[in-house]
Image (cartoon, rainbow, N blue to C red):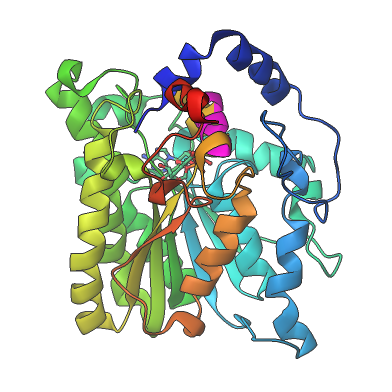
Amino acid sequence: MATQAVCKAQGVVASAIRSSVTRPVASLSCAAPLQSRKANVFVPQRPMGLRSRKLTTVTSAAANGTGLPIDLRGKKAFIAGVADDQGFGWAIAKCLAEAGAEISLGVWVPALNIFETSLRRGKFDESRKLSNGSLMEFAHVYPMDAVFDTLEDVPQDVKENKRYAGSEGWTVSECAAKVGKDWGNVDILVHSLANGPEVQKPLLETSRRGYLAAMSASSYSFVSLLQRFGPLMTEGGAAISLTYIAADRVIPGYGGGMSSAKAALESDTKVLAYEAGRKYGVRVNTISAGPLGSRAAKAIGFIDDMIRYSYENAAMKKELAATEVGNVATFLLSPLASAVTGQTVYVDNGLSIMGLAMDSKTLERSA
Ligand SMILES: NC(=O)c1ccc[n+]([C@@H]2O[C@H](COP(=O)([O-])OP(=O)(O)OC[C@H]3O[C@@H](n4cnc5c(N)ncnc54)[C@H](O)[C@@H]3O)[C@@H](O)[C@H]2O)c1
């Protein structure tokens, strides 16, 4: 499948489109149509912060007693991998909160200070608004670094790193112990984190250290979380992670072993679904999400190209909203999905089903 290279090959068109990506139009209504059949250039439909309104009508149906209910009142959800209001973790938290779940977060230690400061100063208040007018609350915000399982694993330089100073008990096992102490049990576990220090390097140029770091942060971290949180989880509970199509299709630019890490994550989802299913009665799934301009994705450097590529080539010609992933995650984490486990569920506007790049120059002749 052609990707970044296709966009780049389109010269003038691509640069004209690029300017529309960086300056979103002010179409504020979530109810506004997401697409135009005639549209042939990418125009983002909604600013990030307002994307969740439409979904809330879906998840809040339970509270009204209408429709098929997703009622998670009384359920406790631990979400690892939220450090702002732009990513999938936040959107999943919001949807789970709409459905009534209690939310606690595991925030990467180096990002904790700025997250807590922003939260305290009201920077996220607009994004925290639920459909009933209240603000999403977090029962607990724990420091966490998912690449360390126990304190013994933490090297001296990390212990002494000033970004970790002032926080303690942030390894996965210590964090799970705190959650167990505060909550007793957990019904929902969300892994929405990834990191690959050499993500911008092609696999052919990736070092062993970079490759293993990507695997550690992006796939083993999920194994570690389930190992430690599994014993806290209630029977009938569910866990979910986020994967990317680069696990089984070549996406040039998603390097450093990140494609390998996502492939491992998808494979592990099946094995963990079996093992955690038998041991704890817990379901395990992963969502393969389409491109989103989150903080992590922006750091990779080609997310605008991926968003444009998806807009032009996916089955549904519209931009993916994080809340669309949040809605599916909420379903998968709810009893409505009680027979769904071990699955990779694509939430990508149908990009993954396409075998042809619709904006390929080679198709112009027949257009
Ligand atoms: N954005 C996309 O286009 C896209 C597409 C498909 C899948 N995903 C996946 O979605 C998930 C969430 O990413 P996002 O794009 O929403 O970005 P994001 O920046 O919102 O989330 C990534 C989070 O990972 C956290 N993190 C990094 N290293 C960590 C560690 N060692 N311990 C604990 N937390 C750590 C970061 O602090 C951040 O909060 C990731 O698994 C990502 O690969 C993203």
Question: On the rendered structure, is 141 left or right of 238?
Answer: right
| 283 part of magenta stretch | no
Quarter residue 11 falls in: top right
Q: Position of residue 245 (x, y in %)?
A: 35, 44
Q: Nearer the viewer, residue 231 or 220?
A: 220
Residue at the far front: name it: 366
Q: Nearer the viewer, residue 309 or 291?
A: 309
Q: Position of residue 329 (x, y in %)?
A: 51, 64
Q: Quadrant of the C terminus?
A: top right
Residue sitting at 83 percent across and 51 percent down?
A: 32
> Which SS does the magenta portion mostly show?
helix
> Magenta span covers which residues?
304-311
The answer to whether residue 169 is seen in the rendering is no
Q: Position of residue 69 (x, y in %)?
A: 64, 85
Quarter residue 338 falls in: bottom left
Q: Nearer the viewer, residue 160 or 191?
A: 191
Residue sitting at 33 percent across and 48 percent down?
A: 171
Q: Is residue 193 above or below residue 303?
A: below
Count of marks, rendered view: 0
Residue sitting at 49 percent across and 50 percent down?
A: 348
Q: Nearer the viewer, residue 185 or 97?
A: 97
Question: On the rendered structure, is 11 left or right of 150?
Answer: right
| 307 part of magenta stretch | yes
Q: Is residue 219 above or below residue 367?
A: below
Q: Quadrant of ligand 1?
A: top left
Q: Quadrant of the N terminus?
A: top left
Residue sitting at 33 percent across and 31 percent down?
A: 251
Q: Is residue 235 above or below residue 158?
A: below
